[in-house]
Image (cartoon, rainbow, N blue to C red):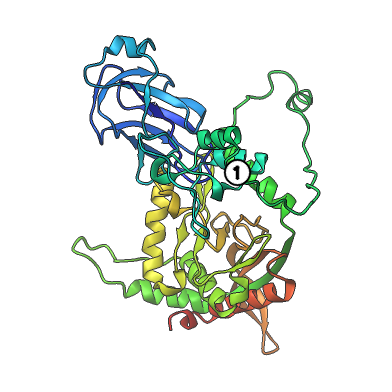
Amino acid sequence: MAVEILMPALSPTMEKGNLAKWLKKEGDRIKSGDILAEIETDKATMEVEAIDEGILAKILVPGGTQDVAVNQVIALIASDGEDVSKVAAGGAGAPKVAAAPAATPTATPASAPVATAPAAPVASGAKLFASPLAKRMAKEAGLDLATIAGSGPHGRIVERDIKAALAGGTAKRAAPAASVAAPVMATGMADETVKKLFEVGSYEEIPHDSMRKTIARRLLEAKQTIPHFYVSADCELDALMAAREAINASAPKGADGKPAYKLSVNDFVIKALAVALMRVPDANVTWTEGAMLKHKHADVGVAVSIPGGLITPIVRKAELKSLSAISNEMKDLAARARNRKLKPEEYQGGSTAVSNLGMFGVKNFQAIVNPPHATILAVGAGEQRAVVKNGQLAVATVMTVTFSTDHRAVDGALGAELIQAFKTLIENPVGMLV
């Protein structure tokens, strides 16, 4: 029977993606493991592998199509012995549906039917696996996902399971949540209203891609739902600059004559932030409505500018890593970020973030907290300034940093304690080496 190829979910929260291009054409023989297509999310481009064999009979969604819904049928494969032309014309009867193709480097399996008996409802306390669409449908219907049997890959709950539960009345209703008035979100001027403010022909209209749409949505939500609080401090960098020069000068060289590492100021910033969070653990948290998540390690996201937007790859357990390890890891992450080759687990999550605009000569700024983080550090340029030391006027290299915090999780005094710990480490870098 014919096999449907579905748009895969590349992350737990993905609902739509762009089908960038097909790497196979209609009529090609497909083997398990073949790369079929490239899928773009707002953060990365991933290859989609086939898990079934046969002939690619029909491409239903052409390359270059944007906003393709997860689980939408994108192609048909004719199994061995089937009439390819009939499958392509849709005359082969109801096709057998296979699990969505795997995406590499990594991907969350798409919810798709399999030819096995449905799994039992999830036991109490076990982790639930459900597609984003199934979660939304269950929430809207007030169903308890734990009482629904999943028929997707590995017992994942998918759309048809929710429909079956609604039709058969087999699922329990979720306990009603406390009544909370939904916040009223502000909206801007309508597109046509904005366009009327400018002379016809005086501008070029460039449609938003998925990355820009996601950035706009997430940052708008962050500013409207997170009560931001800001604390700033000036950090003297002279000791750090001297340490950096000495460490780089002593870096061992490989057979090609290149040093094993070359530290940047940003590498010291990442390390100092991670160590500061360990010294002020109450600030190393994530807010949820039911509890505060207190993290055991400092997973530091670092904003990287890429064409069309930015992405925040994460240095995991940064407090445990040497400066040279952080430096080399960031070079690798930044390079792959710009090529959109990061895995989802390399940019999702984290406990804090750094946004450094110092290389652009920016003196100071305030960054927007990016959930699930409760803090983000905005870093300005290091510059020579007049300072007073022991009552005497002197010149020092000074950098202004600003912590933006989620005030629900990090109060003013706690934010001040965190920035003081960071300042101490930056001004005395030997403290982050022991």
Whether residue 16 is visible here, answered yes or no, is: no
Whether residue 194 is visible here, answered yes or no, is: yes
Q: Is residue 265 left or right of residue 332?
A: right
Q: What is the x, y in percent for residue 254?
A: 22, 65
Q: Under tag 1, what secondary structure?
A: helix
**Picture quadrant where residue 322 is located:** bottom left
Q: Is residue 311 left or right of residue 185?
A: left
**Picture quadrant where residue 194 is located:** top right
Which residue is located at x 60 percent, y 35 percent? 166
| Location of residue 231 with respect to 154 vertically, above or below | below
Q: What is the x, y in percent for residue 415?
A: 68, 72
Which residue is located at x 45 percent, y 38 percent? 111
Which residue is located at x 47 percent, y 42 percent? 150
Q: Which quarter of the figure is the C terminus placed in?
A: bottom left
Q: Nearer the viewer, residue 75 or 423?
A: 75
Q: What is the x, y in percent for residue 3?
A: 34, 25
To which residue does mark 1 refer?
Answer: 215
Q: What is the x, y in percent for residue 416?
A: 69, 75
Q: Nearer the viewer, residue 282 or 322?
A: 282
Q: Which quarter of the figure is the N terminus placed in?
A: top left
Q: Amino acid at mark 1?
A: Ile
Q: Is residue 87 left or right of residue 40?
A: left
Q: Is residue 134 left or right of residue 202?
A: left
